[in-house]
């Protein structure tokens, strides 16, 4: 971490957060698709259940209308029977494409065939009743094999409804499991994003604030004419670490320049003292020479006076 540049630290931190956000988005997209498929399957199973209920109701209308017509020869009951036949056919045609499992398709075919047998027997009874053969019609309609067909039809319909209920229940469980999985994943990713974000923010903040704080301290000391301060500790190799190294170098170079200037000033002061001493000695020598010249002048005057006296004496 300390060997990374500030740009890489910031880029890495935001990159991790962006990656987590992308993961959340991808998970949400996949989960939403799964949830949509599960919801569609739930709706599909519910629709199958409604169609089965409609088919069962249509079979009941068909059976009650047939029995009523055979017993009373009422045309209204026959119309009710025909309406039941039509509704069952429509419902059964809608149910076929919705079936998924082989067992369900097998039951679908079995119920369709059994219902067709029952319809044929009922039509036979209706034809006999129309022909005035009421007893024969009743015998055909309530024959043991016909009752067995009805029992088989009801059993197959019940089995088909039970399988549809089970598929609907499974679809609901899949939907709930998908919702729970989506919530858990979202919570995990959000928690991870918060932890990583706080950790990266703290690391970057500590790295920046520590280096900046040490740099400010050194600048204040240098501004206060304290060049003897120790070098700033460099703990990173990023831009702030490089700035700290440059600041250490600048402080050391400035201290060397000041020391060089101070050393030069000492040499100049020593030379000035030597020059001053030489000047003093020269001044003392000049004064001595002046005194000696005065003495020579005095001696010359005395000699001139003596020469004058000798000259006078000679005269």
Image (cartoon, rainbow, N blue to C red):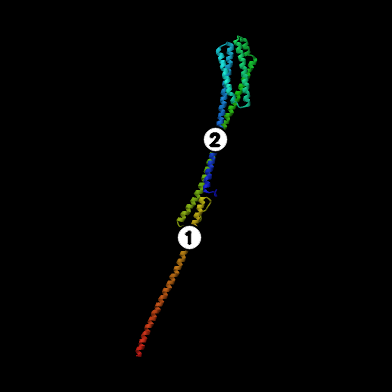
- Horizontal side of 252 relative to 154 (left or right) equals left
In this rendering, the answer to whether 210 lies above or below 173 is below
- Mark whose residue sits in front, 2 or 1: 2
| Location of mark 1 (residue) | 257
Up/down of 288 relative to 57, above or below: below
Horizontally, residue 70 falls left or right of residue 282, namely right
Left or right of residue 79: residue 270 = left
Q: Is residue 260 visible in this depiction of the protein?
A: yes
- Decide if residue 229 is in sight here: no
* Residue at 63 percent of width and 10 percent of height: 136
Q: Secondary structure at mark 1?
A: helix
Residue at position x 47%, y 64% in the image: 264
Q: Which mark is residue 29?
A: 2
Furthest residue toward right: 145
Residue at image coords 38%, 83%: 300
Residue 3 drawn at (x, y percent):
55, 50
Q: Residue at x 50, y 54 (%)?
A: 246
- Front in this rendered view, residue 51 or 120: 120
| Depicted 47 relative to depicted 80: above or below | below
Question: Sequence-wise, which precedes: disc 2 or disc 1?
Answer: 2
């Amino acid at each position: 971490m300390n060997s990374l540049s500030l740009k890489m630290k910031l880029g890495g931190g935001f990159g991790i957060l962006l990656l987590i956000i992308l993961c959340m988005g991808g998970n949400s997209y996949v989960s939403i698709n799964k949830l949509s498929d599960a919801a569609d399957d739930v709706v599909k199973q519910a629709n199958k259940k409604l169609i089965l209920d409609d088919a069962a109701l249509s079979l009941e209308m068909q059976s009650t209308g047939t029995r009523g017509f055979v017993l009373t020869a009422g045309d209204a009951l026959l119309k009710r029977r025909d309406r039941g036949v039509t509704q069952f056919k429509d419902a059964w045609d809608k149910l076929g494409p919705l079936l998924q499992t082989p067992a369900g398709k097998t039951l679908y075919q079995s119920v369709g065939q059994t219902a067709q047998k029952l319809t044929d027997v009922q039509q036979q009874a209706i034809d006999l009743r129309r022909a005035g053969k009421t007893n024969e019609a009743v015998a055909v309609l309530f024959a043991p094999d016909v009752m067995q067909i009805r029992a088989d039809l009801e059993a197959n319909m019940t089995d088909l409804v039970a399988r549809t209920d089970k598929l609907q229940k499974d679809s609901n469980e899949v939907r709930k499991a998908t919702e729970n999985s989506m919530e858990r994943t979202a919570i995990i990713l959000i928690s991870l994003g918060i932890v990583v974000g706080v950790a990266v923010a703290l690391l970057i903040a500590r790295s920046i604030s520590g280096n900046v704080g040490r740099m400010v301290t050194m600048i204040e000391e240098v501004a206060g004419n304290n060049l003897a301060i120790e070098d700033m500790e460099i703990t990173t190799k990023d831009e702030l670490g490089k700035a700290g190294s440059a600041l250490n170098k600048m402080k050391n170079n400035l201290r060397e320049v000041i020391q060089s200037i101070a050393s030069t000033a000492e040499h100049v002061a020593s030379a000035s003292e030597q020059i001053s001493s030489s000047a003093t000695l020269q001044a003392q020598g000049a004064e001595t020479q002046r005194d000696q010249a005065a003495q020579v002048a005095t001696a010359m005057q005395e000699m001139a006076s003596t020469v004058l006296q000798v000259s006078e004496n000679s005269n």
